[in-house]
Amino acid sequence: MGRQVTKVRSRGEQIRRFIVSHVEKHPTDIAKLAAEHFGITRQAVNKHLQRLVEERALVSDGKTRSCTYRLYPLVQWLKEYELNDSLAEDVVWRSDVAPSLGQLPENVCDIWHYGFTEMFNNVIDHAEGSSVEVLLRKNAAVTELAIVDNGIGIFRKIQAELGLVDERHAILELSKGKLTTDPANHTGEGIFFTSRVFEAFDILSGGVYFSHKLGDAEDWILERARPETGTVVWMELNNHTSRTLKKVFGQFTSDDAFGFTKTVVPVRRAQYGDDKLVSRSQAKRFLAGLDRFKTVILDFTEVESIGQAFADQVFRVFASRHPGVELMAIKANSAVKSMIQRAKSAT
């Protein structure tokens, strides 16, 4: 009898979770969608809809078949902080952010703890501004959090510190995973891993908009029509995700090692506009910092061709100088593969 009750309760939770996950895209036909998905009647689904409304997970408008549903905004919280020497990310997390997040599964809370403290610490140490705002919005399905500072701008600072040609090249450096302008105090891994543990992660700064979405093969870079000062970091996470920090970190750790030893680098980020990847100087710029890894996966998506000098610098010169680094090329077309093979055969 107890097992049967548990089974019924579990199915009810599945139905309600399905409703919460799909109601934003199906506000008028969520009952029909759930009924078809679970093979039950709309009357049965309506009981779950009513319960979610009573629990303040959903808001309903209208009656019977014309009723529409939307997620109830459980939390909306905003606070501004002065950037000074006394501001600490762990204190802000413990006193303000964690209580505002409320009850969440342990793995979800761990992701928020990691992501928020990493990004807020970046603002404290690098923004060079006077203030920072934290905005949090939570409903029954997802939570989103934005950190907004009025500082110099993350991409502009990386460009200046590393002597890069423009802000877009800063994204290439970030995509490698160990970029830091302050190696004595930072490993440079924070933004890389934070962008990969959330469902969505965006940075808006200066003239560049960087976006990483869960499941996408690579990051997106867009140019903003009106460059603005400061930096906005935005993160979104499903409240019931099964993902864990351990699982995400494990994707970038070699089987025989501890720590961040493996990275995937989109080669096309080394290009400026319509420039082709032909020179040794381009290759040297692209390779900067990759000797810190044991495995480097070079993703040649959307790279139509590479020059002999570029290929030679990467696959012969760099490879021979760093025998402990394994270079792996993926998603290369036939022309690129041919040039890579030519460089390797010259060793």
Image (tube, helix red, strand yellow):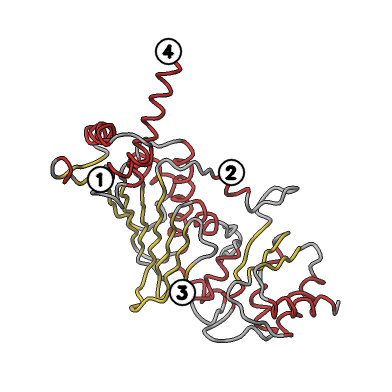
**Mark 1 → mark 3, Cα distance in angstroms:** 35 Å
Q: Position of residue 216 (x, y in %)?
A: 51, 61
Query: Which amino acid is tagged 2?
Result: Lys
**Mark 3 → mark 4, Cα distance in angstroms:** 64 Å
Q: Which residue does the numbered mark 3 point to in the structure image? A: 156
Query: Which amino acid is tagged 4?
Result: Met
For the N terminus, the quadrant is top left
Q: Is residue 21 left or right of residue 31?
A: right
The mark that comes first in sequence, 3 or 4, is: 4
The mark that comes first in sequence, 1 or 3, is: 1
Q: Which residue does the numbered mark 2 point to in the structure image? A: 246
Query: Which amino acid is tagged 3?
Result: Arg
Q: Position of residue 107 (x, y in %)?
A: 49, 39
**Mark 1 → mark 2, Cα distance in angstroms:** 30 Å
**Mark 4 → mark 2, Cα distance in angstroms:** 38 Å
> Quick check: marks 3 and 2 in contact, CB under 8 Å?
no
Q: Is residue 197 left or right of residue 308?
A: left
For the C terminus, the quadrant is bottom right
